[in-house]
Image (tube, grey):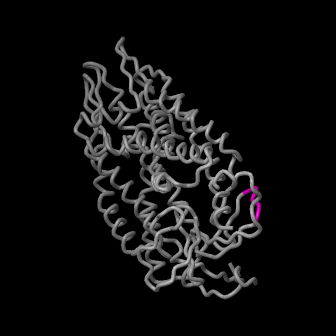
């Protein structure tokens, strides 16, 4: 961290994020440069990264509340009808003596989307105001978000499987509730949001001098 | 050219940039383990399992067979009061579609069926081309595969199955199907194929740039 590094951009180079090819860009506004090896459109930094991330985070935050409050599943048997939200599904798991699974589902379905929205907001604000605070930790946080975000889709699959499975004639049926499409949208939007964020922007405000891998340090 | 990269020794110094902080870095000539960015600690390069195209191709073809099995056989079945019903992988999205949940059905079908299938086909296609000593002529396969990757969610579906089984366990007799085991084996083989492919890809990268 104490060392200073030369960035590829400072050397007029950029990396293709698909195939990892390192290429030169010459103009100040390098638009429509395609990777000579794989053909992907390449930019030194993701275009309009902070704006796009902020818009997607905002959209996901709006949908987050109805997604958690509306029922995701309706179980109907001969004697009763039961509407389940994400939280009541977790409580059901907890009281059914499968508390390790209940904790896991609580983590990926409730905490992760919330954590993702909070953390992405923090990353957007800290990058916008060019904070130099805890760069390495913030980068690590971003990587964690990218890794964990997909796992929130768990409940959507649970509902899908139960709907397909529970078709016992007259005895019991399971119907998907209006919370499911909303919840799936939250997961998709936050996944796009973390993909739109460019962690290199956080590092751009750090001073750069030596060592230089081209000239040798 | 691509296949030659397999046997050729890697050149001396390879220059790259960190995808996470844009630091310009020298990659050590021969990598046997993981290389982290000294500035931000991101993984810049990870050594793969297989060193030959044939190994990766064999893993990939086996994965394809298990994927077909996973889609043709029931994943789980329940029995209650003499009545029995089962669910398959395509059945999950079909049932959602029938209930008017077309968006959710689409998301489930994309993440558990189409994207894993497309991703594996792309990898197999690239490996096939590599085996018959053709260069990266199907670059769009390469791009497609990389872009689709985060949206392949088989492992999450597997865990979702576990949650569903636990939820049903209290009031119905749950039977695990051939589809579930096949899906598990597919998951492992698919991961191994991708991991092997990444290493091969790295050599081709070194080859092109030297």
Residue B51 versus residue A104: which sits nearer the camera?
B51
The residue range painted magenta reads B29-33
- Left or right of B106? Residue A22 is right
Q: Residue at x 38, y 23 (%)?
A: B86
- Left or right of A67? Residue B166 is right
Q: Residue furthest top?
A: B82
Question: Can you say which quadrant of the picture contains the N terminus of chain B?
Answer: bottom right
Prevailing secondary structure of the magenta residues: loop
The x and y percentages for residue A32 are 41, 73
Q: Is residue B135 above or below residue A139?
A: above
The x and y percentages for residue A77 are 27, 25
The x and y percentages for residue A24 are 55, 78
Residue B23 versus residue B163: which sits nearer the camera?
B23
The x and y percentages for residue B5 are 69, 55
Q: Residue at x 42, y 39 (%)?
A: B113
Q: Is residue A104 above or below residue B77?
A: below
Question: Would you say residue B123 sits in the magenta stretch?
Answer: no
């Amino acid at each position: 961290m104490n060392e200073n590094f030369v960035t590829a951009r400072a050397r007029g180079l950029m990396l293709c994020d698909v195939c990892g090819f390192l290429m030169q860009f010459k103009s100040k506004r390098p638009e429509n440069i395609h990777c000579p090896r794989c053909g992907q459109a390449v930019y030194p930094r993701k275009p309009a990264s902070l704006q796009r991330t902020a818009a997607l985070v905002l959209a996901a935050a709006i949908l987050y509340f109805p997604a958690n409050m509306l029922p995701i599943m309706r179980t109907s048997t001969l004697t009763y009808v039961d509407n389940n939200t994400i939280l009541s599904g977790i409580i059901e798991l907890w009281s059914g003596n499968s508390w390790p699974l209940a904790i896991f589902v609580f983590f990926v379905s409730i905490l992760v989307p919330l954590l993702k929205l909070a953390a992405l907001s923090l990353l957007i604000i800290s990058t916008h105001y060019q904070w130099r605070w805890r760069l390495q930790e913030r980068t690590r946080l971003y990587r964690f978000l990218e890794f964990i975000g997909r796992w929130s889709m768990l409940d959507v699959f649970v509902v899908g499987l139960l709907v397909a499975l529970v078709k016992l004639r007259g005895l019991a049926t399971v119907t998907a509730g209006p919370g499911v499409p909303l919840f799936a949208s939250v997961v998709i939007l936050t996944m796009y949001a973390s993909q739109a964020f460019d962690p290199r922007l956080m590092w751009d405000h750090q001073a750069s001098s030596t060592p230089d891998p081209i000239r040798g340090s | 050219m691509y296949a030659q990269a397999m046997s050729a020794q890697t050149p001396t110094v390879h220059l790259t940039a960190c995808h996470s902080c844009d630091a310009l870095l020298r990659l050590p000539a021969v990598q046997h383990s993981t290389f982290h960015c000294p500035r931000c600690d991101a993984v810049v390069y990870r050594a793969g399992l297989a060193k030959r195209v044939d190994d990766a191709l064999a893993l990939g073809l086996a994965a394809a067979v298990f994927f077909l099995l996973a889609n043709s056989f029931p994943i789980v079945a329940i029995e209650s009061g003499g009545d029995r019903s089962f669910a398959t992988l395509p059945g999950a999205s079909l049932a959602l579609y029938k209930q008017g949940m077309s968006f959710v059905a689409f998301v489930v079908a994309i993440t558990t069926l189409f994207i894993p299938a497309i991703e594996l086909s792309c990898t197999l296609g690239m490996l096939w081309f590599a085996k018959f000593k053709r260069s990266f002529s199907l670059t769009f396969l390469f791009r497609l595969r990389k872009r689709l990757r985060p949206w392949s969610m088989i492992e999450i579906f597997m865990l979702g199955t576990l949650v569903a089984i636990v939820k049903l366990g209290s009031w119905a007799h749950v039977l695990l199907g051939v589809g579930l085991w096949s899906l598990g084996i597919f998951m492992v083989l698919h991961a191994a194929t991708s991991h092997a492919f990444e290493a091969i890809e790295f050599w081709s990268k070194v080859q092109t740039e030297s």
